[in-house]
Image: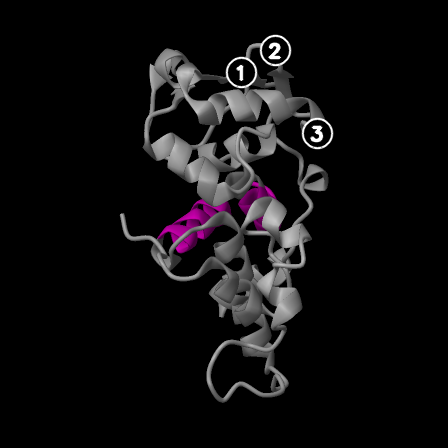
Amino acid sequence: MARYTGPICRLCRRSGEKLFLKGARCFTPKCAEDKRPKPPGMAAGRRRKLSERGTHLREKQKARYTYGMMERQFKHSFLIAESMPGVTTDNLLVILERRLDNIIYRLGFADSRSQARQLVQHGHIILNDRKTNIPSVLVKAGDKISWREGSKKTEYYKTALAGIEAKITPGWLSLDKANMTAQVLSLPAPTDIEALFDVKAIVEYYSR
């Protein structure tokens, strides 16, 4: 599946705000959005005032960048949310949070979603006692997540284990920090999710 392979920090500069795509680096003086807050491009000057359509597009792009999704995949998630009973904005937020790579990030196994996606793609993660390499798979309540036995011998795992105590686990996830195993207690409620984008604007973008 296609994925964005360009400079990650460029996405934050294009959005005009921090999206925290590079983990701990975003909190240091090395953050590109702090060093170069102007949009990317040789002739980049002051940001122009966006039209209503442009504002909706920007919010949609921020959501895509945050979860590391391409347009086709993101729109597919929206169509699923739209077809479900209930409020589309709430449904979309929950679907995005249910992605396996996002769960790995929320558990503190990775410092960013892109790092979490790489862990899944390289086969380090076990979902319900089966190895999976699909970052976009949607977890369900009761699902169990652990590390592949061979991956526990890696330096990355040892570093993650040493730093897991400092990580905060969302209330809808249960984490055994000693064994680095987790379980999805329930699906997240929209109020559990701190979105860096306007979900209503995304719905309006696709509904026009």
Q: Can residue 84 be spotted in the picture?
A: no
Q: Which residues are magenta?
A: 73-93
Q: Estimate the spatial distance between the alpha carbons at disc 2 and disc 3, rounded to whole Å.
A: 14 Å
Disc on res. 168: 3
Q: Amino acid at mark 3?
A: Ile
Query: At 58% across and 88% down in the image, what residue appears?
Result: 45
Mark 1: give few (<14), some (14-19) or many (20+) Cα within 10 Å. some
Local SS, label 3 = loop
Query: At 55% across and 60% down in the image, what residue appears?
Result: 62
Query: At 55% across and 77% down in the image, what residue appears?
Result: 39
Q: Amino acid at mark 1?
A: Gly
Instruction: Name the residue beneath numbered marker 2.
Output: 178
| Dot placed on the residue nearer the N-terminal end, 2 or 3 | 3
Q: How many marks?
A: 3
Q: Is residue 120 magenta?
A: no
Instruction: Name the residue beneath numbered marker 1.
Output: 142
